[in-house]
Image: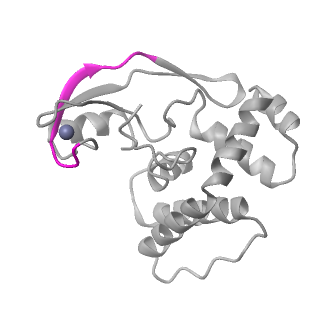
Amino acid sequence: MADQDAAGQELASSSMRCPSCSGGSLRPWGHARTRVLRGLHGARHTLRPRRARCRDCGATHVLLPCHAPPRRADTLQVVMTGLLAHQGGAGARTIAADLGVPVDTVRSWVRSVSAHAQWLRERATRWAFRMDPTHPPMQPTGSPLGDALDALGHAAAATARRVPRPLTAWQLIGLISAGCLLAPVASTLSG
Ligand SMILES: [Zn+2]
């Protein structure tokens, strides 16, 4: 989902399916605790995610907007900026200082995304060709992480050309990676 409003509308129309039982419809169930996410340049984004409960199995889920990675303190914009800097050859300490985050956090992004770089690349590549069947083949960058980031960039650009709704590149990448940039097994609905 692109934002909190979209999450609310989708929920209201019961078009979202429960990820626990893969079938039940979700209904609004108040809000989860407020989170504060780190943005670029010291920005702080306050987020009060909606909560939903499954009519069938009773499981509750927190609905996160697509620019907020599950269980992370940073926005996707910050994470992607760090990953692209890493890919560009910057060291973890430099990236950490630039972004104002702990150096271990930067290392954990690189580890986490590298660990499922192929999953991300395949998903983003399929996405890009679905959005633009005439998309030229993607060129190898020399590393699995680089290939994944490159494919995500192509997929986001191809989507932006097709979809008139003004989504930011970071929101697009959240959608394309299904909220799983940092952890492929987690659903965007968990957390
Ligand atoms: Zn359910």
Outermost residue, top direction?
Answer: 33
Q: Which residue is found at the position 47% from the left and 45% from the top?
A: 179
Q: Quadrant of residue 6?
A: top left
Which residue occupies 11% across, 37% down? 56
Which quadrant of the figure shows ligand 1? top left
Relative to the observer, which residue lies in front, 79 or 187? 187
Please indicate whether residue 72 sits to the left or right of residue 145 in the image.
left
* Rendering coords of residue 159 (x, y %): 46, 63
- Name which quarter of the figure residue 138 lies in: bottom right
Q: Position of residue 70 (x, y in %)?
A: 48, 34
* Residue in the foreground of this view, choosing between 102 and 150: 102
Quadrant containing the N terminus is top left
Is residue 24 highlighted in magenta?
Answer: yes
- Which quadrant of the rendered structure holds the C terminus? top left
Residue farthest to the left, as pictured: 56
The part of the chain drawn in magenta is 21-34
Q: How many marks?
A: 0
Q: Position of residue 163 (x, y in %)?
A: 40, 61
Q: 36 and 182: which one is in front?
A: 182
Horizontal side, residue 181 vs residue 103: left or right: left
Above or below: residue 96 compared with residue 19:
above
- Please state if 24 lies on the left or on the right of 90 as rendered: left
* Quarter of the view holding residue 190: top left
- Looking at the image, is 60 positioned above or below residue 176? above
| Residue 22 part of the magenta segment | yes
Q: Residue at x 69, y 22 (%)?
A: 42
Residue at position x 55%, y 50% in the image:
169
Image height of 181 relative to 191, above or below: below
Q: Position of residue 167 (x, y in %)?
A: 46, 48
